[in-house]
Every structure is written in structure tokens, then in C-alpha cells.
Image: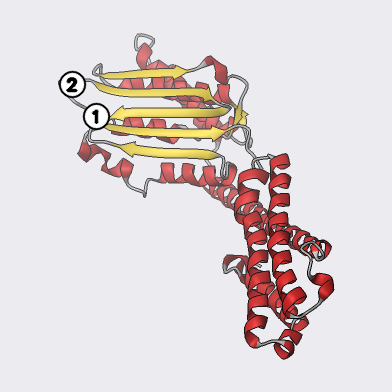
Amino acid sequence: MEILFRYRIDHILFWVATISFHAYNRSYIIDKLSWGDFVVELLVRNLLLAGVIYGNLWVLIPRLFNTKRYGMYFLSLAGLVLTYVLFKNLHDMYLYGYVLGDTKRQTLWVNTFYNVSIAVFYAIFSMAIWLSREWFYQRELVQKIRNEQLATELQYLKSQMNPHVVFNTLNLIYGSIHKTNPVARQLVVQFSDLLRYQLYECNAEKVGIEKEIEYLQNYINLQRLRKNDNLKVEVNFHQDIQGILIAPLLFSPFVENAFKFVSDHAHALNRIDIQMFIEEGALVFLCKNTKTEKQMKPQSSPGGIGIANVKRRLELLYPRCYELEIRETNELFDVFLKINLKPSL
């Protein structure tokens, strides 16, 4: 089935069958007129049908049906069918009425019912082709997601440490740090919160955006403690994003990269700007950091595992419902991610 759709074999088989059947039914034109008239009949009828079919598949369905503008879709489809009928009626009137001498077919609209039924049948058939392809690709996508989830789970189980051991060790470290060193104690607490979120709260398909923001803020605060005073970090999570469900850990690789590859100028300001807000029903995430060219080579390369994983997850979880742009200038690295919260079919 995959080969059938990938190489358009379904279209080839369809046109071979359609043209062959039509040629068989109109073969008498060769005897009564000529091969030229026979070929013209095949071309006119099937080119007009191709206009109906591919106008529906390539224009009307993507631009109108997929965007839920159903009234405009059916109106436009009716216009496409009527266009086919008009031109086919003209050709039928000329060929059968005047050239072949059938006086009953010498009026423009005598073949309307037949031509309308043909056009409507093939329009429905083209929709069936599209639906079958969409069903196939959706089924493949679901299976791919399941396989990747299974592979991830198996890999996680192989590498998983006992979380109780980890947290007990962190508690031991926290208790061993003297109370006069609050910075070190705070680092252990924030690291423990980060680890707890990753181990226990990210197993769900989607999490509340508040938890994701809390995780990001903990990570940002942790990084602020280890960075020098020459780094300015601006964070703005707008209030209008409350109550949203989102796939976990989509934004953290970009924030991690920002801190990892931010510039380290001694006599100039180093800056990281992080924003998240709602715009036209979509969740927008922005992350910018100053840079030096030699520092950014690992980040901008396509082999970065974190960003590569995020791109793959976006393709699987939000297909055709997201925009991701990663831009780089001589002084700035800029990430723009927009996720449509109300995806269209």
C-alpha cells in the first residue's frame, strides 16, 4: 500500500482503467469517422475529467475542505462540475450532433444529465482516493508513534536508575551541606525539583503548561546561580497561557542550549531572553541569546540530539500544526516555536 501511494501507482491504475473503458465504448468513432476524431474525443473527455479530479484534490480539498470551509467547498465543487458539463456538452453537440448527424444531440443541454452524473461520480471518487490516502498515512503515523514510544520506554528502562536511591542521595548531600552555605543547598533543592519533574510528571502525553513553566523557571534559576553577573536573563511567561495542556519538555532543549552557548563577553553584556504567550489561538515560544561565532558551531549544527529530538516529537505530536524557525546572525541565536492549539483536520 505504501508503494502504491508513494509512487502514485493508484493514479496510474485509475487512468489506465478509465481511459481504456472509455476507449472501448467510443471505438465506433474510428469506423464512422477517423482515428483523429477518436483521439480528440478521448483527450477532451479525460482532460476535462482530470480538471475536475485534480482541481478537487489539489485545490479545493487543501484550501477549503481541510480548513473547514465546507459551504465554500461544495459551492466551488459545484462550479467545477458545471464547468466540466458546459465544455463536454459543447463537444458532444459538435461531435455527435453535427459530425455524426444525430439530430437529437444538436442542442447544448441534451447530454447534461449524463455529463453531470459522470462529473459527480469522479468528484466523489477523487474524494475517496484522498480519504483512503489520509487514512493510510494516519494509520502509519499512529503506528510510528507507538513504535517510537515503545523504543523510548525500553531505552529508558535499560538506563533507569532507582529514583529512590537518587533522591536519598540528594537528601544526604543536602543534609551534609552546612547551613551557612545557602547557595549550595538551594542548588540541591532545585536540582531535586528538576529531577522529580522528569521522573514522575513527564510520563503523561500532555501536562499543564503551569508545570512546564515551573520546570523551566527552576532550570533558569539553577543556571543563574552558576553564571556570572555579566549575564542578563529576561523571562516573561504571560498570564494568558494558564490552563493549557502541552506535550512535556518541548521547550527545555532550547533553554538549555541558550545557557550552554550564550556569549561570555568580558566587557559587553551577555543576554538571554525567553518569552511564552498566546497569539491568535497559538502558543508562541521565543528564546534568544547573544553568541560568539565559535561558540555557536555545536548548537547550529544539525546533529544536536536535543533539538533533533524536539523536531521529531513536534512532527509526531503536532503534524502540520506547528512552526519552528531557528535563526542565527553574527551576534544572536533566535528560536521561534509556534504551536496551534486548535489544529484543523
Residue 336, which numbered label?
none
Q: Please name the residue shown 33% across and 24% down the image.
A: 272
Distance from the alpha carbon under mark 1 to that under mark 2: 9 Å
Q: Amino acid at mark 1?
A: Ser
What residue is shown at x 22% (from left), y 27% (from top)? 264
Picture quadrant where residue 256 is located? top left
Instruction: Report the residue that reaches farthest toward the left.
Output: 267
Front in this rendered view, residue 234 or 155 = 234
Is tag 1's residue or tag 2's residue first in the polypeptide sequence? 1
- Asked whether, in this view, residue 29 is left or right of residue 304, the answer is right
- Percent from the top left, x then y, of residue 182? 37, 11
Query: Residue 11: x, y in percent?
Result: 64, 69
Residue, far top:
180
Q: Is residue 314 visible from the viewing direction of this image? A: yes
Q: Place residue 38 in its image quadrant.
A: bottom right
Residue name at image x 73 percent, y 50 percent: 78
Percent of width and height locating residue 208: 61, 25
Residue for badge 1: 263
**Dot 2 amino acid type:** Ala
Q: From the viewer's perspective, is 129 left or right of 250?
A: right
Which of the pair 262/54 is nearer the observer? 54
Residue lying farthest to the bottom in this orientation:
31
- Quick check: can you spot residue 173? no
> Which residue position holds label 2?
268
Asked if the residues shown at circle 1 and circle 2 are in contact, with their CB atoms under 8 angstroms apart, the answer is yes
Pointer 2: residues within 10 angstroms few (<14), some, or many (20+)? Answer: few
Q: Residue at x 66, y 68 (%)?
A: 1
